[in-house]
Image (cartoon, rainbow, N blue to C red):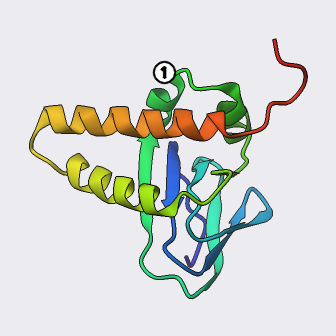
Amino acid sequence: MARFDRHNEIELNLLDRGSLTYLLGGRRISIPPGRLAVFWAAVPHQIVNFAGVAPYRVMTIPLAWFLQWRLDERLVHPVVHGEVVLAPEADYPMDRLLCDAWLKDARSASAELRRVCLREVECRLRRLAMGLPRSGPEV
């Protein structure tokens, strides 16, 4: 990327292989392959390095939808505070297939298929949040 980008959406990235490094909010963040990455793209971001990256998957979700889903704070808090959240473990085969299906469904003429796609994205983010560590005592 020749310059910084910013847009008021939540961005999901998934690399097949290689690595991608963003300058995001003044910090260098590396995205490893096979781990779903989630960040708020309103934070200025720029790809500053990449190695062995094949075409990769990018999906954006309007911030309002992300917030309306009332996802677990383990995911929401770091994302809205400018951090990149990586899926705790590479769930590459499932995520790759899901992302490919979502990209196809999002372009569909079927409103019902697009609704299903959004529900699946929401559920994947819920699952991702469940795998993140809790801070502080559980209530």
Q: Residue furthest top?
A: 139
User: Residue 100 appears in which quarter of the rendering?
Assistant: bottom left
Q: Residue at x 45, y 33 (%)?
A: 123
Q: Which residue is mark 1?
A: 68
Q: Residue at x 71, y 32 (%)?
A: 74
Position of 64 relative to 18 (above/below): above
Position of 13 relative to 56 (above/below): above
Q: Residue furthest bottom?
A: 52
**112, 88: nearer the viewer:** 88
Position of 118 relative to 2 (above/below): above
Query: Which percent across, then down, holds residue 75?
Result: 66, 35
Three-letter residue code for mark 1: Gln
The N terminus: image quadrant: bottom right
At label 1, counting other C-alpha atoms closer than 10 Å, the crowd grade (few under 14, some 14-19, many 20 or more) is few
User: Residue 71 appears in which quarter of the rendering?
Assistant: top right
Query: Which percent across, then down, holds residue 26?
Result: 79, 61
Is 68 on the left or on the right of 77, as rendered?
left
Query: Which percent across, then down, holds residue 39?
Result: 61, 49
* Secondary structure state at the residue bearing disc 1: helix
Q: Residue at x 62, y 68 (%)?
A: 46
Q: Residue at x 63, y 61 (%)?
A: 45
Position of 31 relative to 107 (above/below): below
Is 75 on the left or on the right of 56, as rendered?
right
